[in-house]
Image (cartoon, rainbow, N blue to C red):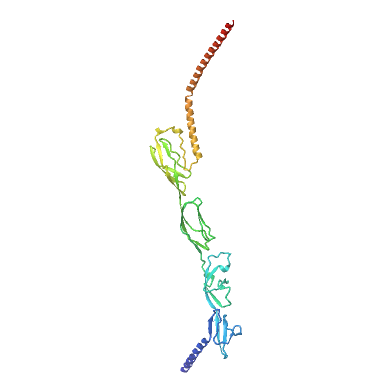
Amino acid sequence: MRRILGVFMALFMFCVPIGIQAEEKVLSFEYTGQKIEIDDAIGYHLIDDDKFVLKAPKDCGRYRAYYSDGSYIDYEITPKIVHVNVRYNKDWRPGDPEEDRYLCEYDGDYELKLRILPNGDFVSFDRYDGNIDFQFEPKNEKDISVEKTKITHSNVEVYYSELGLTIENPVNDVKPILLKDAGEYIVSFDADSRYYESIPFKVTILPKTIELQLPSYQKYVGEKDPVLETDDYILIREPGEEIGNYKLTVKSKSKNYIYEIVANDTFTILDSKQQSIRPEEKKDPLLSVNASNKDKNKYASATDMESNKDIETKVDKESTKTETKVVTGVSNFTSMYYLMMVSSIAVVMYILIKKRNAKS
């Protein structure tokens, strides 16, 4: 038993140095693109191609270098390992070249074109004659997450415009946002959810302020209020029907506008004893801030017509008296005319008779 164990230990001690010596003779070099020369070698045998050449090789393969004494040494040139990080191209769309669907990031100046095998593994179209070993991470496209383009926009605060508000985005295939009315909105762009993630943002459209220069609104005690409403706003006065001034406020009919009274913001109730015309003949139309000259002329014409009717009424009341005076005047004038005519005829006849008697 001891003899067998001794033989085993001897073999073990003998084999270890042999193995180490064999490893030292097998050389390995990584491809660099330059020739790999062995010192003092006079020729090289390409083992895989069974060729003998004088120049040192540079491409990957197994080689044997010979010395002048006939001895040799075996070595190999291995492919250079290039690590490639693969990620999804978030700008890729159906119809674009398939090789552009993924982006590759790596160190070095290589023309790498990615190819996808039927099982989903990544390989390169060009392996540089086997001298470059592209190692992809992840190795398969099923392990690549689809990255979406995030669309962000700062909050917006503007005043209302009749043209509306259009918010553009620099991404070509994303539609702009169009808002028409004043208010507060939480919006996001309408984009294809397969490729985009639109982050919501706040849009505030403030009402537009319009200044009002009102006409002087008034009435007499006991009369109805004039119309205090237009197509755009409503005027509201303080309650009360006694003589005095009452504050006017304005309420907009649209959320897009705010009206501010800057002139004549009071409604006046006058004493009825101060009326210059009868209440039923008084006209009190609502004149808006931008009333046209045509409307003003219309109201003026209506007032003139009222005044003409009043004048005609006064004339009718005095018609009988005036007519009597005219008739009496005409009668007196006619009597004097006949008296003068008779006197003249008498004088003429007297002169003719006197001349006739003188001739006789």
Which percent across, then down, holds residue 159? 46, 52
**What residue lies at 54% left-to-right and 68% top-to-bottom?**
102
The answer to whether residue 21 is left or right of residue 220 is: right
Which one is in front, 166 or 2?
166
Which percent across, then down, holds residue 143? 52, 70
Q: Quadrant of the C terminus?
A: top right
Which percent across, then down, holds residue 8? 48, 91
Q: Is residue 267 visible?
A: yes
Q: Residue furthest bottom?
A: 3
Which percent across, then down, holds residue 337? 52, 16
Q: Residue furthest front?
A: 359
Q: Relative to residue 27, is residue 119 depicted above or below?
A: above
**What residue lies at 53% left-to-right and 84% top-to-bottom?**
27
Q: Relative to residue 336, is residue 201 depicted above or below?
A: below
Q: Relative to residue 141, is residue 193 depicted above or below?
A: above
Which one is in front, 352 or 178?
352
Q: Is residue 239 visible?
A: no
Q: How many numbered marks are there? A: 0
**What residue lies at 39% left-to-right and 40% top-to-bottom?**
245
